[in-house]
Image (tube, rainbow, N blue to C red):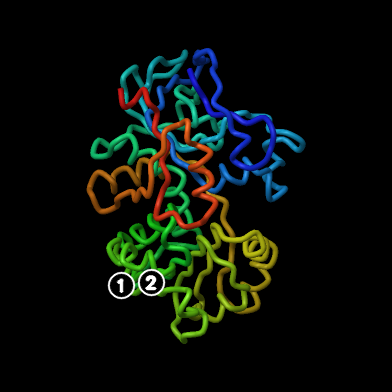
Amino acid sequence: MQAMTYQTYGAPDVLQLTTFTRPVPKAGEVLVQIHAASLNQADLYLLRGKPWVARLSSGLRRPKRPTLGADIAGRVITVGGGVTQFQPGDAVYGDLAAYGFGGFAEYVCVRAEALAPKPASLSFAQAAAVPMAAVTALQGMRAAGPIAGGARVLIHGASGGVGTFAVQLAKTMGAHVTAVCSARHVEQARTLGAEHVIDYTQEDFTRDGRRYDLILVVNGRHPLAQYRRALSPRGRLVVVGGDVGTILRATLLGSVVSLAHSITVRSLIARPSRDDLLFVGQLLDSGVVVPVIDRCYPLGELPEAMRYLATGHARGKIVITMEQADQ
């Protein structure tokens, strides 16, 4: 089998296509033939080893795990002892982030609980675009309490993987959605269901006088005071992404700001959840939520895909496909 690996932190050029013996599943694991995988910001952080906190789990001096890739979709080949929920031939998808990554490869062995049945309505490429981004969006929406019908929700960073799912999930919850993105993504945000779209290059939503019951920060860099200015009384600010400074401020100062101003401010590190993935899968099969894919690359072009991700201009997800799946 082939896998794209790295032995040192750095730019995408450190990635190399490597040949391995196909792994054998242990008890509780399944061997999956991967048909598609998708990129996440986590892959870019781990590749670079920056910010430094990315190295706490991956190795301080050099990577402990040679293969990146969390989101996968493929077929079960064999199952290890004790696995009853899957059988060879089952189409599955999942997030491997809590189980050592390894998705940028033709095969991977992973704990069965990391996987869920692939939505029948999706191709493998579409399914691979879902797990981490959709679950992050869902958990972000739920993080500060349920969303009431008619709530005013703003998605700051509505054009990437998490943002495109967040817009759609907020709509399923009955929210009135405002999307913040660049001009080239305005029509996409409207198509996904946003009633109001703000081009951040032309307008600062923290200064226009509108107030929101929930602001979900997917990709933003405003100080907390500016976000607070755009919240309604007892509004909620949840930070799931953005620059490091924004995340740290929400993490370290969120509780203080919350108490001082009768609002809720918090950061969230999403966790893989099979239950959440099953919930999203139902929405996908019903057609009320759809994955948005910008580009697909073959496994051997993963470095180029990483460079494109690093530009920050992707409309939705970037997917890696395996030649074997096409054959």
Q: Label 1 belongs to which residue?
A: 195
Expressed as whole percent of the image width and height from the top left, the position of residue 63 reads: 68, 33
Q: Label 2 belongs to which residue?
A: 178
Expressed as whole percent of the image width and height from the top left, the position of residue 71 reads: 46, 38
Say which quarter of the image contains residue 194.
bottom left
In this view, the residue in front, 100 or 279, is: 100
Task: Report, in whole angstroms, how far the alpha carbon at label 1 lies from the one at label 2.
Answer: 6 Å
In this view, the residue in front, 4 or 280, is: 4
Say which quarter of the image contains residue 124.
top left
Q: Secondary structure at mark 2?
A: strand
Question: Measuring 36% from the left and 22% from the top, which residue is drawn there?
Answer: 324
Expressed as whole percent of the image width and height from the top left, the position of residue 250 reads: 63, 64
Disc 1 + disc 2, Cβ < 8 Å: yes
Say which quarter of the image contains residue 225.
bottom right
Q: Quadrant of the C terminus?
A: top left
Question: Measuring 25% from the left and 35% from the top, which residue is drawn there?
Answer: 120
Q: Is residue 136 left or right of residue 63?
A: left
Kind of residue sitting beneath label 2: Thr
Q: Secondary structure at mark 1?
A: loop
In this view, the residue in front, 297 or 155, is: 297
Rendered view: 204 above or below 86: below
Q: Which labelled disc corresponds to residue 180?
A: none
At label 2, counting other C-alpha atoms closer than 10 Å, the crowd grade (few under 14, some 14-19, many 20 or more) is: many
